[in-house]
Amino acid sequence: MNRLNGGNFFFTRLMYESGDWDVDQRMPSNLLHSIVSYTTIPVNTEEQIVPLGNKEIFESPFCYISGHKLVQFNEDEKKNFKAYVERGGFVFADDCNHDIDGLFAKSFELQMAEIFGDDALQKIPNDHQLYKSFFDFDGPPTTSQELNGWGDDLVHDYLKAIIINGRIGVLYSNKDYGCEWDYDFRNKRWYKTDNTRFGVNIVMYALTS
């Protein structure tokens, strides 16, 4: 897959029929601002919203899916998700509940098992290329939601992934990065360290691995 197809990078949010897909609405513009600030990647700064069952997803170099509620893909959504990932696409899935026992987590993981097999979703090591693709991290950064004790009251020291042909096809987080990055990008000046930097790593990995 040519992940930019000679054009600009654009952020695609996947719309699915079940659940609440339209969460963390300021996050995409904030992350896109970081890509513009830190990299030389040409960027379309408007979020794209594409139904998962639509063939348009195959034009997307990077897809994001999130929510709090039930994830139960219909047949077209399952077919497109599987084909997109197996053709070299990249999906970042983030649990807004930051809860391994929550509805989103349980239902999304069941969907991945149904589509890719029971053991497809695996923990990735904290020295994975993902953590060195632009900035250096020693594993997934902790979010304030975890530290505040919401969700499952755990700090997750790993991410999970489905590996296709040696690269991550689906990156899965229970850490709620969407909420962590859901603020106006102009407020970054109040942060000692820009907490969206790991999002840059995710995008850079998706485009270059």
Image (cartoon, rainbow, N blue to C red):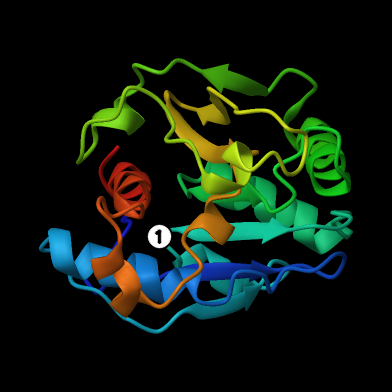
Q: In the picture provided, is 30 more to the left or to the right than 56?
A: left
| Residue 1 sits above or below residue 119 on the image | below
Q: Which residue is drawn at 50% across and 79% down?
A: 48
Q: Residue at x 61, y 76 (%)?
A: 50
Residue type at mark 1: give it: Pro
Snapshot quadrant of residue 146: top right
Q: In the picture provided, is 65 more to the left or to the right than 97?
A: left
Where is residue 190? Give x, y as percent.
Answer: 29, 66
Residue 10 is at least partly visible in this image: no
Q: In the picture provided, is 89 more to the left or to the right than 194?
A: right
Snapshot quadrant of residue 86: top right
Q: In which quadrant will I find the C terminus?
A: top left
| Residue 70 sits above or below residue 141 on the image | below
Where is residue 104? Give x, y as percent.
Answer: 81, 48
Q: Give the residue at mark 1.
A: 61
Q: How many marks?
A: 1
| Residue 133 sits above or below residue 21 on the image | above
Where is residue 49? Give x, y as percent.
Answer: 58, 78
Q: In the picture provided, is 173 more to the left or to the right than 200?
A: right
Q: Which residue is drawn at 80% across and 30% down?
A: 113
Give the residue at the far left of this rendering. 40
Q: Nearer the viewer, residue 146 or 86?
A: 146
Q: Nearer the viewer, residue 11 or 23?
A: 23
Q: Which residue is drawn at 61% across and 47% down?
A: 145
